Image (cartoon, rainbow, N blue to C red):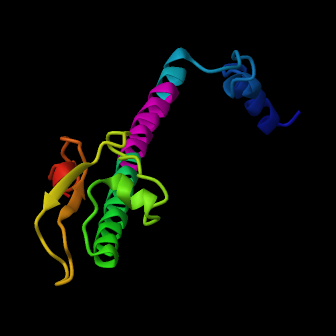
Amino acid sequence: MSILTKLRTSAEAGRPSAARRHGAFAPAGFTLLELMIVVAIILILIAMGIGRYERSVLRAKESALKQDLVVMRQAIEQYTLDKQVAPQSLDDLVTAGYLRDIPTDPITRKKDWRVIYEDVVLSPEQSGTGIGDVRSASELVSPFESTPYSSW
């Protein structure tokens, strides 16, 4: 046996074996602390995702409300110009074929639109007045535009 081999074996005698140093005999699995950290990170990510999801749903509702208002206002104007009299109710727009159905307000989830009667005449031939505008019946305020939905 060479001197180098003797030195190597005597130096290794005081140290744990390589298998023991690298955890070969350690129990497999995760500690409670590691699991708690992973669960906390997952919960934080879920909370962030829920917030973004709720904001995107509200933006979609606002977009649908704006589109519904544009369509109904165009139908009121077209009805008034064609018939030479403004509609007296939103049902007049449906029966005349200008709207397929009265849309549901995406904010209140009801067909409870607030109609505004005006004495505005759109053409010289117009013989009567009626609905001039339509708005949402919701008294909630848009968090994105800081205005009430009923003012749109």
Q: Residue at x 49, y 32 (%)?
A: 42
Q: Residue at x 43, y 57 (%)?
A: 94
Q: Residue at x 28, y 62 (%)?
A: 87
> Whole-percent x and y of residue 11?
69, 27
The answer to whether 144 appears left or right of 28 in the picture is: left
The answer to whether 114 appears left or right of 120 in the picture is: right
Q: Which quarter of the figure is the N terminus placed in?
A: top right
The range drawn in magenta is 38-56
Give yes or no for residue 40 being in the magenta stretch. yes
| Residue 75 versus residue 92 in the image, above or below | below
| Residue 21 versus residue 112 in the image, above or below | above
Q: Quadrant of residue 84?
A: bottom left
User: Of 119 and 3, which appears nearest the observer?
Assistant: 119
Figure disc tally: 0
> Whole-percent x and y of residue 137?
23, 44
The answer to whether 121 appears left or right of 80 in the picture is: left
> Whole-percent x and y of residue 88?
26, 57
Q: Residue at x 28, y 47 (%)?
A: 113
